[in-house]
Amino acid sequence: MSAIAVTTTVNGDPVQFLTDPGETLLDVLRYKLNLMGAKEGCGTGDCGSCTVTLNGRIVCSCLVLGAEVDGAEIGTIEGLADGPNLHPLQQAFIDHAALQCGICTPGILVASKTLLDRNPDPSEEEIRYWLAGNLCRCTGYDKIIRAVQAAAATMRGA
Amino acid sequence: MRYARPETSTEASRLLATEPGLARVLAGGTDLLVQLKAGMTEPDLIVDIKGLPGIAGITREAGGFRIGAAVPNQAMGEDKALVAAWPGVVEAASLIGSTQVQGRATIIGNLCNASPAGDSVPALAAADAVARISGPNGERDVPALDVAVSPGKTRLAKGEFVTSIFLPARPANSGDAYLRFIPRTEMDIAVCSAGVNLVLDASGTITAARVALGAVAPVVLLVEAAAAAIIGSKLDDAALARLAKAAEAACRPISDKRGTIEFRTEVAGVLARRAATIAYARARAAK
């Protein structure tokens, strides 16, 4: 097995790493680039806790090989805040207590961000469908939906 | 396991054809990586086809659309002209998986996974879509309906892979639709499904029809008797009843945890009727 050299961009920064052909992007992010925000829940693309953006689309990083992302642009939860200033979504999740254990939260924030980028004023139904691939076993989703709506309102006003 | 990202389809075919062990094609990876994780497949070589020229685009061709093998389903829904021409195909593709899966999964992967329950396949069969296959002997075109031969098995020879799907030009007064039954609201596998594609004359009489059913046989079925049951009609109640009966008669499903033979058969008739009603309304509204 020979290592593959990959050059990519993560949260705007150029990054290089060596990967094995079977290694997932999730494992590269966590164990080679030390970006521990994306979580491995199921490892099979069902739970969304490993959600990142790949060239502007959200994907489950457990279903992407590290070797595939040469030349790509990747966005993770670590790139959401602007330095010490939380993104409105992050602030809304705190204000609305939209998390409990927190395992699903990075994936939900990354997914919600791409929704609001595309649709600044989504309906509750649109939010629920967009986030259908992000499972949360704590909150019952209601507070998550309200937090996304609140963040959307803040961002529209900003 | 090795990973290759060829830059021409000739090179991709050569890699696939000359690999002495198991070679697997990678596009969106939403089936392949799950299979890898589960140990269901242990390839010696993964051939990532996303570097091939034109593979990631939707292009206009002869009044129709050519959809590359690396086009994620989400991109189909973003192409307004494609949505306007083939709403049934796009809604079928858009039903597959979560938003995350939509960002990676492809209709060609869905086709080559060869599941009888693949959502895009009945819609592609109803659309008379054509798969372009690249292989060691060059390119060939086959109907999308003919790619799968049994659950998990395709007609593709060693070294062959599908590079694009072609959706033909639409005549005036045409429309398509796809419906599936699942017990949830999203992110589930079709218990059964129906794709219907209709062409009308100016008075609203159906002049051509294609009706395809999913998850009621080992492969997706194109039901010619169901099409014949509505051609020449204006989709009145009698025609819809004949359509449902013909659809039911074509079903040869299995009973499993997702549905019984009786349930799938009855629902197939209902879905064919409802999909035909939507396709008819779209054809009436189309220019």
Image (cartoon, rainbow, N blue to C red):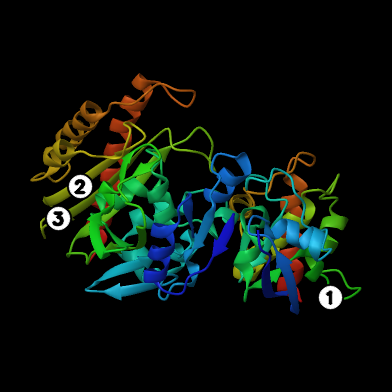
For the residues bearing labels 2 and 1, Cβ distance under 8 angstroms: no
Are dots 2 and 3 on a single chain? yes
Q: How many marks?
A: 3
Check residue B210 in the rendering and tell me which mark sits there, or answer none.
Answer: 2
Query: Who's the residue at 32% across and 51% down the image?
Result: B156
Quadrant containing the C terminus of chain B in the rendered view: bottom left
Query: Who's the residue at 26% across and 42% down the image?
Result: B212
Query: Who's the residue at 48% across and 70% down the image?
Result: B6
Can the viewer see residue A11 in this picture?
no
Residue at numbered disc 3 = B200
For the residues bearing labels 2 and 3, Cβ distance under 8 angstroms: no
Q: Chain ID for label 2?
A: B
For badge 2, the amino acid type reads: Arg
Q: Chain ID for label 3?
A: B
Residue at numbered disc 1 = A82
Q: Nearer the viewer, residue B234 or B263?
A: B263
Q: Position of residue B285 (x, y in %)?
A: 26, 60
Looking at the image, the residue that sits furthest to the front is: B20
Q: For the residues marked 2 and 1, what is the alpha-carbon distance in whole angstroms?
A: 54 Å
What crowding class fits label 2: few (fewer than 14 Cα within 10 Å), some (14-19), or many (20 or more)? many
Q: For the residues marked 2 and 3, what is the alpha-carbon distance in whole angstroms?
A: 12 Å
B260, above or below B40, in the image: above
What is the secondary structure assignment of the residue under circle 2?
strand
What crowding class fits label 3: few (fewer than 14 Cα within 10 Å), some (14-19), or many (20 or more)? many
* Side of B187 where A84 appears, left or right: right
Q: For the residues marked 3 and 1, what is the alpha-carbon distance in whole angstroms?
A: 56 Å
For badge 3, the amino acid type reads: Leu
Q: Chain ID for label 1?
A: A
B246, above or below A134, in the image: above
* Side of B146 where A56 appears, left or right: right
Looking at the image, the residue that sits furthest to the left is: B232
